[in-house]
Amino acid sequence: MRRPRLGHPLRRLSLRTRLLCLAATLVAVGLLVAGVVVGLALHGYLQDRVDERLAVTGHIAARAPEPSGSGGQQGKRTLSLLGDTVIAYLAPDGSVRRAIDTGTAPPGGGPDLPPLDTAAVMAHGGRPFTVPARYGDHPWRVIALARPGRGTFGRAPGGASAQDDAARGNAARGNAARGNDAAGSVVIAMSLEEVDRTVAKTRAISLTAGLVLLAVLTAAGWIAVRSGLRPLTRIEETAAAIAAGDLSRRVPELAGPRTEVGSLTASLNQMLAQIDAAFRGRAEAEARMRRFFADAGHELRTPLAGIKGHTDLYRMGALPTTSDIDQTMDRIAAESTRLARLVEDMLLLDRLDEAADPSGAGPGFGLALAPMDLRTLAADALRDVRALDAERAVTLTGPGGGRPGSAPALADEARLRQVVTNLVGNAVTHTPADAPIRIGVGTVGGHAVLEVADQGPGLTAEQRRRVFDRFFRVDGSRSRTAGGGSGLGLAIAHALVTAHGGRLELDAAPGAGCTFRVLLPEADE
């Protein structure tokens, strides 16, 4: 037999593990995104601070006079720095004219500046830009600003007045006096090494804190998931116990009834109760069926054995006279009648069972319903008792005593007469000859009532529970002496009353007699 394919590898993991992996992944992604956003925001903030410093320093340096010194020595040197800031004065062609030098080598060899002639400086528009270091990994932030000079004061296109020429000449002579012999620009560069170091340190701290937080949250998540899925574990244990045969197990209520787990627990317990009841009912039905077949087999075997025995006597010639043959035929006829009655009773019970099938699969039991008064059956029952036992004391009263009353009902008189006959026969057969019998008839609580009460030995609790079972007899024997029946009379009476939509009740106690009470819905007269 081929095993079913599991599909994705995650399906091989338990639900607890998958939930934990999903939660840990979401937390890790969240921490990573937060770290990236914080790093970028911090880098942008620190770079803006550097840009502000560059702007302030650049405007000051652009308006201040160039520092004096030997131009040849300054031109041979590389860029110098003031702390981590480089200030360089450039000629219009972009060559370094002078630079501030503190004698300290800049990080990474200083900024690797692109050509910054006058046109390139004007193209940057005074906005900071980033350049790499010459020999390192740390970038530099640079701003280039044009300085006023002789080139700045050139003749305007289209001509100008003599006064403007004089003014520009005076300015040029002033610049020359201060050592500014040609127009140029100033470049301010600040290293971003400290910015990168701060951002890297922040990212390292964020990564360490994130890993620690992820580990703590994973451990807490494991505990939370394990606690949250504990009801499912209990359900699994209960299902395993039920599969092993313990149908009495139930899922413990570990959550409120309005929660998902509580609702699932209640539904499962209700389902388990129904399954348990179904299995118990099936077991009881099987036990009753086995008992029924055993009793039915014995009931059928007894008359058949009698018929076969008398037939064998006739075949063997053991009946020499006509009188013996007549007696044997009478016995065979009696046993046949008894066998036919037993088969008819069993068939009647089978039809009543089909009519009472909850699934509605049965064809139903036909009843010839018609308006009637149970006083007719009560009067006939009184005469039946006197016919069966003329010495028996019998009275006709109302339900529980008093005067008999009208009891209108919609019923099948022939079937109800069969019920009353069984009840009367049961009372006469199973009580002493001196025990009086009472027939009661009337209405109680919207029901037409007919009851047969005796003052015999009564019944125990176990006997009351089984008195309407098929083939049940109080004495527990299979003897048919003393007028014993087959044990189907009360079962048939109970089934017929139920088919009428009524009920057959029994009040009995040891030593206090029995009262069988038929209750049918009262009909309008």
Image: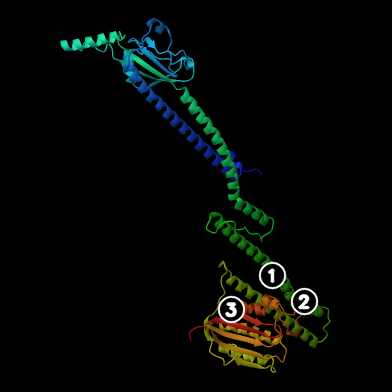
Q: Visible in this render: residue 150? A: no
Few, some or many residues within 10 Å of mark 2 (<14, 14–19, 20+) = few
Please report contact status of discs 1 and 2: CB closer than 8 Å, yes or no.
no
Q: Is residue 400 found left or right of 311 in the rendered image?
A: left
Where residue 465 appears, as percent x and y from the top left, is 67, 76
Q: Is residue 16 above or below residue 205?
A: below
Few, some or many residues within 10 Å of mark 1 (<14, 14–19, 20+) = some
Where residue 484 appears, as percent x and y from the top left, is 73, 82
The part of the image, by quadrant, that contains residue 235 is bottom right
Q: Earlier in the sequence, mark 3 or mark 1?
A: 1
Q: Residue at x 18, y 12 (%)?
A: 164
The part of the image, by quadrant, that contains residue 315 is bottom right
Residue ranking furthest to the left: 161
Q: Which residue is mark 3?
A: 503
Q: Which residue is mark 1?
A: 288
The amino acid type of the residue labelled 2 equals Ala
For mark 2, give the secondary structure. Answer: helix
Q: Which residue is mark 2?
A: 305
Q: Earlier in the sequence, mark 2 or mark 3?
A: 2
Q: Which residue is nearer to you in this view: 52 or 95?
A: 52
Q: How far is disc 1 from disc 2 in space, using C-alphas?
A: 25 Å
For mark 3, give the secondary structure. Answer: strand
Q: How far is disc 2 from disc 3 in space, using C-alphas?
A: 38 Å
Of circles 3 and 1, the one toward us is 3
Q: How far is disc 3 from disc 1 in space, using C-alphas?
A: 22 Å
The amino acid type of the residue labelled 1 equals Arg
Where residue 491 appears, as percent x and y from the top left, is 65, 77
